[in-house]
């Protein structure tokens, strides 16, 4: 693994890394998923290369453990993982990218069982139950038992297992990197937007998309009824050849007036799919608009995927059980 030539885009734009050691001497790996350009990574890297990168990182972690075992005079064979969900939004809920990320996590668990002692989720957003619902099928029961979830109130619990001097400053500790870098990017990669010049066009998969043609001067209107709060609508679409106008509005429950939620605008989506999501804070019918009325002569071939993600009552109970528990 040490001689594997890492691809430039993966090495430069993948987030996370081993940032410190906990009070037991275990390496602490920080996963900054909210800062990962999921779409860019998906379109610019082949699946096998991302798998190799994750396996390579795990072999590096094993090497760190061996060094730590020699240093401390005791066996160190597991690590602590801190999953930071700060800045989680529509980019991370994008279906293909999230599925790939979860596949990589499962790959590690299958190849390195019992490698993780504890998984601490911090900065969990309001939509965490939806995020958890998507992820739960790929989280083993054993890993679920190791998981503890916190919002922005994580620091007192985290300091029980990581010394303040070791914890990176951006999380409330005192460790800084060169030039007083509070994010310790010399150890924890910061990621960033992947330039489209790196995109590989052959990785685009639209097999699960609906297909239609919107004639010149016409519109396509899709209605999504939302009957419970904190649901998430996510979308992905692309056209063949030219742009399309896209917007979202809401007809609140008990009303006939339509409110703009996402203002309609023309989207350049003929190269790679456009995607996004919104949290439905109000009940009612959300109206998805694909508008080609501005084009007098050209119809648009449209491929799209619209999903409504709804909270699951049983999973909500499971989320409540792992939220704000004490770290062991």
Image (cartoon, helix red, strand yellow):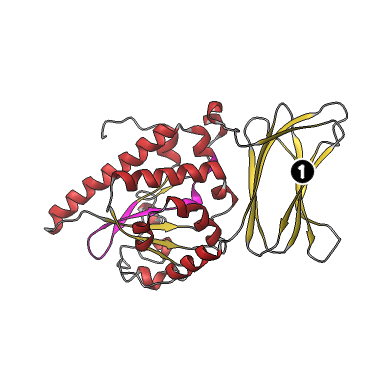
Part of the protein shown in magenta: 18-39
Residue 237 in the image: x percent, y percent? 67, 38
Please tell me whether residue 96 is drawn above or below residue 233 in the rendered image.
Answer: above
Residue 124 in the image: x percent, y percent? 50, 63
Q: Front-most of 226 and 76?
A: 226
Hey, which quadrant is residue 230 in on the image?
bottom right
Residue 35 seen from this side: yes
What is the crowding at mark 1: few (fewer than 14 residues within 10 Å), some, or many (at least 20)? Answer: few
Q: Is residue 32 magenta?
A: yes
Label 1 residue SS: strand
Q: Is residue 280 magenta?
A: no
Residue behind mark 1: 265
**Which image quarter holds the N terminus?**
top left
Hey, which quadrant is residue 148 in on the image?
bottom left
Q: Give the side of residue 323 with respect to residue 65, left or right.
A: right
Residue 152 seen from this side: no
Residue 27 in the image: x percent, y percent? 27, 55
Task: Look at 84% across and 64% down and name the residue there.
Answer: 255
């Amino acid at each position: 693994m040490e001689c594997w030539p890492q691809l430039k885009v993966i090495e430069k734009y993948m987030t996370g890394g081993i940032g410190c050691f906990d009070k037991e001497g275990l390496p602490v790996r920080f996963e900054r998923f909210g800062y990962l350009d999921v779409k860019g990574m998906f379109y610019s890297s082949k699946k096998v290369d991302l798998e190799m990168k994750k396996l390579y990182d795990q072999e590096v972690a094993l090497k760190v453990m061996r060094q730590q075992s020699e240093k401390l005079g005791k066996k160190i064979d597991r690590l602590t993982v801190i999953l930071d969900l700060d800045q989680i939004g529509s980019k991370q809920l994008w279906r293909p990218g999230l599925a790939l990320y979860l596949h990589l996590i499962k790959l590690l668990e299958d190849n390195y069982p019992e490698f993780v002692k504890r998984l601490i989720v911090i900065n969990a957003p309001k939509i965490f139950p939806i995020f958890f619902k998507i992820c739960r099928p790929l989280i083993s029961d054993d890993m679920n038992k190791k998981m503890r979830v916190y919002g922005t109130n994580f620091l007192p619990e985290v300091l029980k297992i990581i010394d303040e001097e070791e914890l990176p400053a951006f999380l409330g500790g005192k460790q800084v990197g060169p030039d007083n870098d509070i994010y310790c990017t010399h150890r924890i990669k910061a990621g960033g937007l992947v330039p489209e010049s790196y995109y590989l066009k052959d990785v685009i998969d639209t097999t699960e998309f609906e297909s239609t043609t919107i004639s010149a001067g016409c519109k396509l209107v899709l209605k999504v009824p939302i009957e419970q709060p904190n649901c998430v609508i996510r979308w992905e679409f692309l056209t063949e050849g030219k742009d399309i106008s896209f917007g979202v509005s809401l007809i609140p429950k008990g009303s006939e007036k339509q409110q703009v939620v996402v203002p309609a605008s023309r989207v350049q989506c003929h190269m790679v799919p456009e995607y996004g999501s919104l949290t439905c804070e109000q009940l009612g019918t959300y109206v998805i608009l694909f508008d080609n009325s501005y084009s007098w002569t050209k119809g648009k071939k449209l491929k799209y995927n619209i999903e409504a993600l709804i909270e699951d009552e049983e999973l909500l109970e499971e989320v409540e059980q792992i939220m704000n528990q004490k770290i062991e």
